[in-house]
Amino acid sequence: MAILVLGGAGYIGSHAVRELVAAGRDVVVADSLVTGFAASVHPAARFYELDIRDGAALDALFERERIDGVVHFAAFSQVGESMSRPLKYYDNNLGGTMSLLESMVRHGVNNIVFSSTAAVYGEPERVPILESDATVPTNCYGQTKLAMEQMMAWVSRAHGLKYTALRYFNASGADPSGEIGEAHDPETHLIPIVLQVPLGRREKVSIFGGEYPTEDGTCVRDYIHVTDLAAAHILALDYLMDGGESDVFNLGNGVGFSVKEIIDAAREVTGHAIPAETAARRAGDPARLVASSEKAKRVLGWRPKYTDIRAIIETAWRWHREHPNGYVSAG
Ligand code: UFG
């Protein structure tokens, strides 16, 4: 029996595939390659290029492969784009998940682990954030992820399918081998943008807002290493297959770092001065997002290994230094 990873050519998906293969699992990857990269697909995985909105292609895959669990990363994830093109996000994230669940129900595949996000909480009432806290997304991306969670809940009640929704905080870093890593076009995330300066691709970093109600006035986020996220997917899959109930889990380190602290840590790691200047706030940025991941630790037995922000940035730095053009130069 195999595990199907949808979106397995993307940033977090490719790291999950690597961990699954390392754990000895038989892995099938499906990806549309719209935002993913063929070069990031693990050679040990059987690869299908398909769009999950294509129900016939999914049906053919489920008929050909014997799948007993699905890990679903196949979604668009840019907050800014989701605000200017909401229907693109409804179509892909909700339309794709609907088509996937229909096909899973048709083929009696009952276990799914999928990517949700801290963006489902919107502006948090308090930190650290608990899974039971209010979910009031402030952007369309977070809204589509919350709607995916709700779709799973109703389908689960009607058809007995079981799911775990993993609400990631700030995914960061790269596999320590330096072979796979983060590659977005355009890149909007803080750590890869900061590392573009020592790579000579950008002169300075703009700090979006310097007067937030935080210790140094810049936004605080909970950065969690992508390999730790990947490990949580395997635990969540095993939890379901061992009879666990459908549930929702936060995945973060439980420690917040400000934008300035991230830039300082990157200066230490790279030995580069990394000039930075304060710029206007970015619309929709909450001041502080920090997870409580106690539930994932208690129920899934999850233990993040990368708790030091410099160690996280070091892995990202290795990937970006060895692949300054992302997968374009990976050959
Ligand atoms: N930032 C800068 N300058 C930059 C880029 C980012 O100051 O050039 C700041 C942002 O304003 C924010 C912090 O760095 O305060 C982190 O920004 P990212 O874009 O790296 O990450 P976000 O916290 O905005 O986004 C993350 C995930 C999203 C998810 C969101 C939930 O990447 O998928 O958390 O709020 F939706």
Image (tube, rainbow, N blue to C red):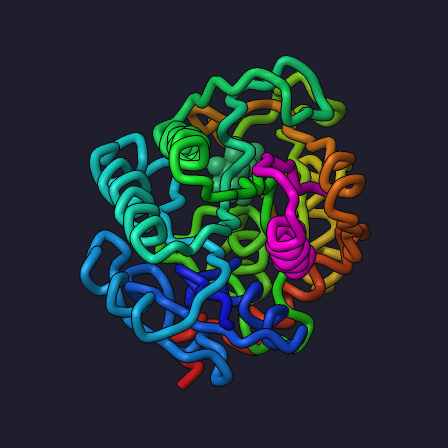
Q: Residue at x 62, y 29 (%)?
A: 219
Residue 168 occupies which quadrant of the picture? top right
Q: Relative to the observer, which residue lies in front, 26 or 11?
A: 26
* Viewer can see residue 274: no
From what the image shows, is residue 248 above or below residue 92? above
Q: Residue at x 71, y 22 (%)?
A: 127
Q: Relative to the observer, which residue lies in front, 151 or 278?
A: 151
From what the image shows, is residue 287 above or below residue 55? above
Q: Does 195 sit left or right of 2 as displayed?
A: right
Question: Is 157 a magenta residue?
Answer: no
Q: Residue at x 69, y 32 (%)?
A: 291
Quadrant into which the C terminus falls: bottom left
Q: Does 261 sit left or right of 325 as displayed?
A: right
From what the image shows, is residue 229 above or below residue 66? above
Position of residue 87 measured from the top left corner of the image (x, y, whole percent): 21, 34
Position of residue 293 measured from the top left corner of the image (x, y, whole percent): 73, 37
Q: Residue at x 76, y 50 (%)?
A: 302
Position of residue 42 measured from the top left corner of the image (x, y, whole percent): 49, 78
The residue at the far top in this view is 125
Q: Relative to the observer, which residue lies in front, 228 or 171?
A: 228
Position of residue 218 measured from the top left corner of the image (x, y, whole percent): 64, 29
Q: Count the labels in the image.
A: 0
Q: Relative to the observer, which residue lies in front, 56 or 174?
A: 56
Magenta stretch, residue numbers: 226-252
* Viewer can see residue 306: yes
